[in-house]
Image (cartoon, rainbow, N blue to C red):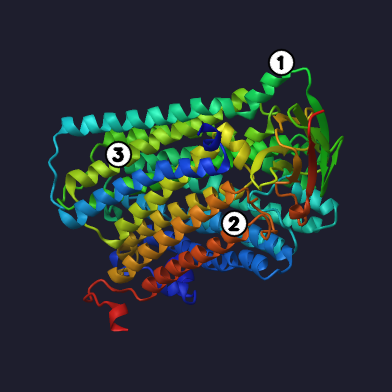
Amino acid sequence: MLDFLFTGWGAFWMTLFMLVPFAFMFFYVIHRKSVVDSGPSGSPDKKMSRLEGIWLTVVFVVFVGVNLASLKFMPTIASAHAATTRTDIQNIDLSAKSWAYELSSREIEAGRPVRFSGRSTDTMHGFAVYHPDGRMLFTMMLMPGLSKPTSLVHTFNEPGKYKVRCLEYCGVAHHAMQDELTIVKSN
Amino acid sequence: MSIASAIIQNTPIFGKMFTVDKSTGLEEINAWPALMIMASFVWLAIAGLLGFVMPATQIFDLDTGHFYTTLTLHGAALAFPFSFQLMMGVGLHRSGGCVGKAVTGVFPALAFITMNLGAALLTVAVLMGLKVSLIVMYPLPIVGAQMGIWSMNSVILGFTGIYLVLACMILCYPILVLKMLFFGTKRPELVLSERSLNDPGMVGMTLSALTLLIAGTPLVIVGTTVLFALYGVIPMTMAAWATEPVVFQYAFFIFAHNLMEAMALMVMSAMYATLPLYLADGTRKLFSNRIANAALWILLLTSITSFLHHFITLYPNQPASLSYWGNIMSWGTGIGAALSIFTVLATVWQHGLRAEPGIIAVLAGFVLYILDGASAMVTSNIAWAFQLHGTMWQSGHTMTVIVAMSMMWMGVLYHHYPVITGRKLDPVLGVWFVRLFAVGGIGAALSMLAGGAAGMPRRFAAWNQEGWMIYGNLILFFGLILGASFVVYAYSLLKSRDISSPVVHQVAAA
């Protein structure tokens, strides 16, 4: 379930999870106290304080829980871990210039981590990799003028053709700035 | 008659909506604010119509250049001369009436001129060919000129316009607010509803002005240097440090992010000031001023450094530790929101509510604001950021926060409109405004978020792939409903009647 939660659609459902109960609660209170019975409720202060405490506790627990659960899915952690524990990292250097990429290789072995190291030579660019089924796997921001490349380690598990798109607006042909990676079965 | 009142009176159509009632003797707190509000609606009309061009270029396969032109104009116009200027106008009227100080003199005029002249210059630059989106995307303006896509003259004009708009938001408006709150003598004849600086309604205003001033100072320094270099006042070599993309981008987002938070502080404080006036039992007080103020302070302190979430995907150039901090602080703003939610609901629960269109618009806008907050927190989590950054999720978030705050301000304006103009609004039209706005706003927000979840890129003139067109069609559909709500609001302003005349339901009469 966590594998789904920390995807694009998982983010959408998480947002609805936070919104929908709140919206129901909000509309209930507003409707009840403006249409059904607009008189003072006279709820004792102690009860309201307890409600406040429960509400803040629930919010805090959800916030902390979600963020702790997300640690495993943070590419920054995966990248750092792979850099220190794996010796079989494939390295792909890339540079972005309006409106095309230059990559040191477009063929990647499945099952082995690959480090993408990217630079921009002119303006802001992005390097976003999409699974063949259309979902985005990760994105990188490429800012010109930096001494270090933007870098990320990812492991592709399924062979196939993976689209690359620029997701940082870079001018009138931004939508045409695309490429393709071929993931092949491991030997 | 003040210059501001004269301009309003001589403006066709929009002037009729905001003509100031001089018989109250409150022209000094009404005229410049009314002019700012009127101007904001002019920009809303222009930018709103432009908003339909983007989906139209995709649905009818038109020139993609039109998409990027509209992208820049629609975004910039709605964020700054519409939303910020609306906040300025309503906020200045409120502060004038709360502290008894006039909104006259150099500063209101400067704030008005810099905002509107700046937006006009940027519009001309975009029509000359500059297509840089509302956040400039530096160094794209320079690179585009070097590639011959647009002229250097359009870059200089555009930068000048952007600089003037920033000068309004960072200098003119905050200095004016702080001047009114802390300096000068109170004039009892201008006081509508006396407030102290301990009231949540005033605390937010103070924090907002200080946030704009402080968070914007680095950008003023960088922007001034760049502008001087563009105009040849200083050699380009002296401006080299400011033209480094990383310097410009960080200075820009320290301000841009905190601009949204400052606007949130303002609108929260306006809600805290307005809600008590509509309580059914007439007590006119929040459930707890302590909790309300705590919410504002938590929002302020957590949001100052949460701007780091804009650069999460720049790893490792932005160290992971800073990204983690940005992640934590962004979710910290949610604690402030949780306290605001409790304050609002507890207040209504304890005291009951008179459900008039103005306050319902404010509360519906608050729901939209919380929807946006949830989407913002999600995308500022590092794991989700790497899957969502650069997609329509961000566009949905940006649009929703601006739309939500605008709805709240339009609700607050409903409340203040009779005092400014001496006329009252039809409640039936008000209810229709709220219904259409709520449906359009929530629908457009969820459509954009869904598009982002599906990987649909933002600022991207190629919707017809990977099944993204469905999201584009939904955005257009709900955008039309949102547009209809603005038309209803404008119609209600045009059809407003004198305070002394009996309420007639214009829709039924027609």
Q: From this view, report whether residue B508 is shown above or below residue B349.
A: below
| Separation of residues labelled 3 and 1 (CA atoms) | 46 Å
Residue B46's x, y, as percent? 56, 68
Question: For the residues tagged 2 and 1, is the chain the same?
Answer: no
Query: Which circle marks residue A84 in the picture?
Result: 1
Residue shown at the point (35%, 68%) measured from the top left = B432
Q: Nearer the viewer, residue B15 or B460?
A: B460
| Separation of residues labelled 3 and 2 (CA atoms) | 32 Å
Q: Could you tell me which chain the residue with mark 1 belongs to?
A: A
Q: Could you tell me which chain the residue with mark 2 belongs to?
A: B
Few, some or many residues within 10 Å of mark 2 (<14, 14–19, 20+): many
* Kind of residue indicated by mark 3: Phe
Residue A43 picture quarter: top left
- Say if residue B477 shows up in the picture: yes
Residue shown at the point (52%, 41%) measured from the top left = A11
Query: Which circle marks residue B342 in the picture?
Result: 3
**Which residue corresponds to mark 2?**
B75
Question: For the residues tagged 3 and 1, is the chain the same?
Answer: no
Residue A80's x, y, as percent? 68, 21
Few, some or many residues within 10 Å of mark 3 (<14, 14–19, 20+): many
